Image (cartoon, grey):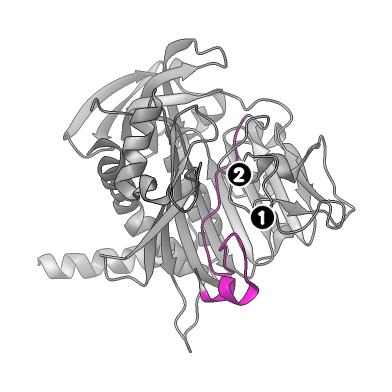
Amino acid sequence: MAKVEPNQEGKSIVLRGAFNPKIFSPMWFVRHDLLPKEEAEAADNVIVTADISTFTAGWLHIRALQPEFFASAAESDRFEALRDIVLGAFQILEHTPVTSMGINSDLHFSTLSKPAQSAIIERFVNISSWSTVLPGEEFISLSTRGKRADGREGHCQVRLEPSRRIENGIFLAINDHFELYKSGDEATAARACDVLKNCWRDAITRVGAIVEHVVHT
Amino acid sequence: MTEAAEKRNDPYQVGDSDTYRNVPPSEPDKADNMAADDTIDTRPPFITRSPSVIPAKRLQNYSDESATDYSMPEEEHPKLVIWTKKPVFRTNFRSLQGWEGLVKSVDEQRFFATVYDLTGETGASEAEIPLDDVQSYDLELVRPGAVFYWYIGYHEDVNGTRRRASDIRFRRLPRWRARDIVAAQDEAHKLRALLE
């Protein structure tokens, strides 16, 4: 099978903890030299309230709720910048309680044909075995989860679905999850920053290995 | 299924501790493999400059409009998704190669840098890059010691037309605080002591 490159790719970083959404306005990122003023001023769909803040500044989408902070980029030449903006924000807000973090990758692959799509899905699950009990069944989604191999708390979860964006395509969602809280311990953003500094490159490499395993083998 | 999700009998198996959320699509009209809870409850007032509101149903994980595993009818639990009305700056950049660079020196028209392949497959290289290739808002960041990311790839527009492109973006991190400098000096002293 010819090597298939992702047709569309996005990354997101999700922190779970206790946040003050009102902080995360586009201009806050400018004031702390994390975002160019020009990009912040062009931000669209800006919402800044005590309960939720969200904006889209070109390549960057930010959404903050009280229990969750979410940042994403849908362009592969902005993934490092995405890491930097989250790292920068939580180096400033280092005492924010953060209990867990996910480095997530979404990849859509164009397989060009239905048989090629089915072959990839069949490697995950034997679809045909369902035809006797579910006539006309259609594969929707399958997830699998493994332990972390780096000694940190957490897991890595992979979800495979037919792509809803590309005909006969494949969608992979990869959640590299880090548990940052242990009972009786203090979980702060400083730990999330440590993970972003030291585990980012491994997370990127892991995505490549998973893609290789699912799509190319 | 996480324990929290089991307790709520969450049909989407998205527990409170999960840290997976989809990257929002840049084209909202396309059905997408979105996480089921990637919708926002609306509790007005929202402060928004240019909201475009589309039904949450259009973005849920299953594009089948007749899907019956949606948690609650929209009439009972109205949901809105606030989405980008305008297209993003650049439609779809697909990088072919990326480097992380360190600026060594700058003159009036260009800067010199050491660049490292982001895949780690090749070693360091020296590069001479025209300042014209740097975004105007990044020019003030171009100085010795600055870190930047350099990608070569192509843009693909909505019609599928591709054109080659080079993109440079300088790293932005918070200003160093006095205690950060002290901590870095301490670390340097420790390293030096180990070497001596």
Earlier along the polypeptide chain: callout 1 or callout 2? 2
What is the span of residues highlighted in magenta in the rendered image? B3-26
The N terminus of chain A lies in which quarter of the figure?
top left
Q: Where residue B72 sits: x, y (%)?
A: 77, 58
The residue drawn where x is 87% and y is 52% is: B75
Q: Residue at x 40, y 15 (%)?
A: B109
Chain ID of residue with mark 1: B
Q: Which image quadrant for residue B153?
A: top left
Residue B129 in view of the camera: yes
Q: Is residue B18 part of the magenta span, yes or no?
A: yes
Residue type (three-letter) at the residue carrying disc 2: Tyr
Which residue shows up at 43% across the image and 53% down it? A142
Q: Give the residue type that dot 1 points to.
A: Asp
Q: Can you name the residue that lies furthest to the right here?
A: B45
Q: Position of residue B26 (x, y in %)?
A: 61, 31
The residue beneath circle 2 is B62
Seen from this angle, which residue lies furthest left? Answer: B196
Task: Say whether residue A216 is magenta.
Answer: no
Q: Number of marks in the image?
A: 2
Considering only vertical position in the picture, is B141 above or below B86? Answer: below
Disc 1 to disc 2, how far (Cα)? Answer: 9 Å
Rendered image: mark on residue B69: 1
Magenta stretch secondary structure, dominant: loop
Tell me whether circle 1 and circle 2 mark residues in contact (CB < 8 Å). Answer: yes
Q: Chain ID for label 2? A: B
Tell me whether marks 1 and 2 sit on the same chain: yes
Please give the name of the residue rendered at 33% of the width and 70% of the height, measured from the top-left corner. A152
